[in-house]
Image (spheres, rainbow, N blue to C red):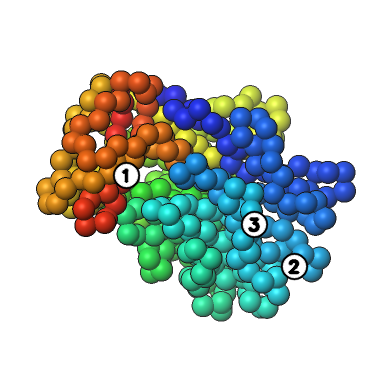
Amino acid sequence: TPLYSSAASDVYKRQGYENNGSTNVATVWKNGSSQNLSDGSNTAYAISVFVYNNDVYVAGQEYNGTNTIAKVWKNGVAQLLTDGSNSASAVSVFVSNGDVYVAGREHNGTKTVAKLWKNGIPQVLTDGSNDAVAASVFVSGNDVYVAGKENNGSKDVAKVWKNGTPQTLSDGWNNAYAASVFVSGNDVYVSGAENNGTTYVSKIWKNGTSQSLTNGTYYATTNTIYVSANDVYAGGSEENGTTNVAKVWKNGGAQILTDGSNNAVVNSIFVDDGQLSIENIADPQNKIALYPNPVQDVLHLAAKTGNIKKIDLFSITGQRLKSWGEETAINLSQFPSGSYFVHITTDDGKTIVKQFVKK
């Protein structure tokens, strides 16, 4: 199973900045070519990127001379999520059915508040009585999941919010945080870390039940999570006694990526597995039948109610590849092996998203 590879031809760097000699400029790279998102007059950072329908969305922050402003850039054009009266940051972006979701935080003058913006409209996830941070957002069907942490007055508690309702992942006796969330079928996976009283242990929570990835001897963290079929991948780092070693865990088993001579960490992970069938997305009632999956050449589609009016094929990164009209079978022989999405529009105007694998 290859890691960090995509079936799409365009590769976007997840986050970044470049110093112009005096300040940091928010930057996104496509296939090695850079695009500046800020003009360099103030310090700015790009933290998360998402591609949808050939549009590139980047979440981050820019300093206004007094505070940092949470921002999302669409194809290089900035939208301000906060007014700059208090410090704020946007740290994760996810686009679903044309809606742009951004997770982050904003200071209220006293404490930091975990926030979610949908199309620029803020939703407060915490009441502001204690510091909190929203670190990751994932949309599955009509459900929006946000992972992060909230202080309970003395310790940071790892949390995941589903449609604004929090679920506590750690018991609050020791500091913990949730860094990334991924939803596969009916299962919610969250990666993060929890202090054992001495150091931090890398953890995964599946539907609220925790699994430790490290034994607690050395400091460790898990920053990102990705689920492909029945395999769960997490990325982060673990100290070796001297430096941080970049690691990927597959179903709890560690793979060491660096030799430990210098500090290293995994911040993002993507899995492309052309041999495995992947669960349907955003069609919990299975209104659209899609078969075979995996498919060799011709993919068949059938609506249980109504008729199919349009089919759009997307790469795993959100690039539109081809469109069809009222078809019940589409020929995919021209496309390479990998994972894809189809957006299926029915005659009631609704669009259902399905994921499949091409052999």
The structure residue drawn at horizontal position 44% and vertical position 41%, both measured from the top left corner, is 318
Q: How many marks overall? A: 3
Residue 244 visible, this orientation: no
Label drawn at residue 67: 2
Q: Nearer the viewer, mark 3 or mark 2?
A: 3
Spatial separation of the CA atoms under disc 3 and disc 1 = 27 Å
The structure residue drawn at horizontal position 47% and vertical position 35%, both measured from the top left corner, is 270
Left or right: 149 in relation to 314: right
The structure residue drawn at horizontal position 23% and vertical position 46%, both measured from the top left corner, is 309
Q: Position of residue 304 (x, y in %)?
A: 12, 48
Q: Given the image, on which type of amino acid does mark 3 rest?
A: Ala
* Residue identified by numbered label 3: 78
The reply to whether callout 3 and callout 2 are in contact (CB within 8 Å) is no
Q: Position of residue 38 (x, y in %)?
A: 73, 52
* Residue identified by numbered label 1: 343
Q: Nearer the viewer, mark 2 or mark 1?
A: 1
Q: Position of residue 329 (x, y in %)?
A: 20, 32
Q: 270 above or below 69?
A: above
Q: Given the image, on which type of amino acid does mark 2 rest?
A: Asn
Q: Given the image, on which type of amino acid does mark 1 rest?
A: His
